[in-house]
Image: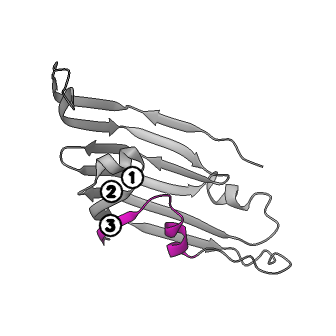
Amino acid sequence: EEGPQELELGGLSIDLSRVSFDPRRDATTPFRVGDVQLTASRFAGDLGKTDHLTFAGLSGSLKDSTLRVDSLRMAPRGGDEGFMKDRKYRGSRLQLGVDRLSAEGLDWGSVTRGTDLSVRRIVLDGFELDLLLDQRLPSRPGPKKARPYPQQRIAALRGPLAIDSVIL
């Protein structure tokens, strides 16, 4: 059963600078834009049945090929209490946090077309990873279900993923 899917996006702004129009009929690009800048002041949304994603600020520039996300957090809906509620068997809880994610050399064209994700460098300032396995609950009976490895999850993405470097 799917849980409630909620989404909140605040302070969204899209600024276009140096916009021009080419009135010629044979113009291949009738509208030209010097830069597109995207900002948002907050985001909160559900990921699947159990997880919740938030950030406190986002800014990006297509001209500069940059993206910055502040106070990025992914955790179970309802925190640890929400994770443990109605749980009969043990399971792993994952929480991720990044004070600031900065992407440089981001290929915005491919991202907006949904064809691939190509980034020269990602910097994760204040990266936190928190895993919990409550041993007080019994293991699920029956054979263990194989989980995909991280590289299998990446391979399942619908387009290529290229990141030259990640700095923690």
Contact flag, marks 3 and 2 (Cβ < 8 Å): no
**Residue occupying the point 68% across, 59% down:** 83
- Give the total number of marks visible in the rendering: 3
Marking on residue 100: 2
Contact flag, marks 1 and 2 (Cβ < 8 Å): yes
Query: Residue 108 location, x and y as percent?
Result: 30, 48
Q: Amino acid at mark 1?
A: Ser
**Which residue lies under the disc numbered 1?**
71
Q: Amino acid at mark 3?
A: Ile
**Residue occupying the point 29% across, 64% down:** 123
**Residue occupying the point 48% across, 69% down:** 129
Colour scheme in use: one colour
From the viewer's perspective, is residue 157 above or below residue 4? below
SS of the residue under disc 2? strand
Is 151 magenta? The answer is yes
First in sequence, mark 1 or 2: give its number: 1
As measured in the structure, the alpha-carbon distance from the residue carrying label 1 to the one carrying label 3 is: 21 Å
Q: Is residue 56 visible?
A: no
Front: mark 3 or 2: 3
Is 13 magenta? The answer is no
Query: Which portion, as a residue range, is magenta?
Result: 149-166
Q: Nearer the viewer, residue 22 or 62?
A: 22
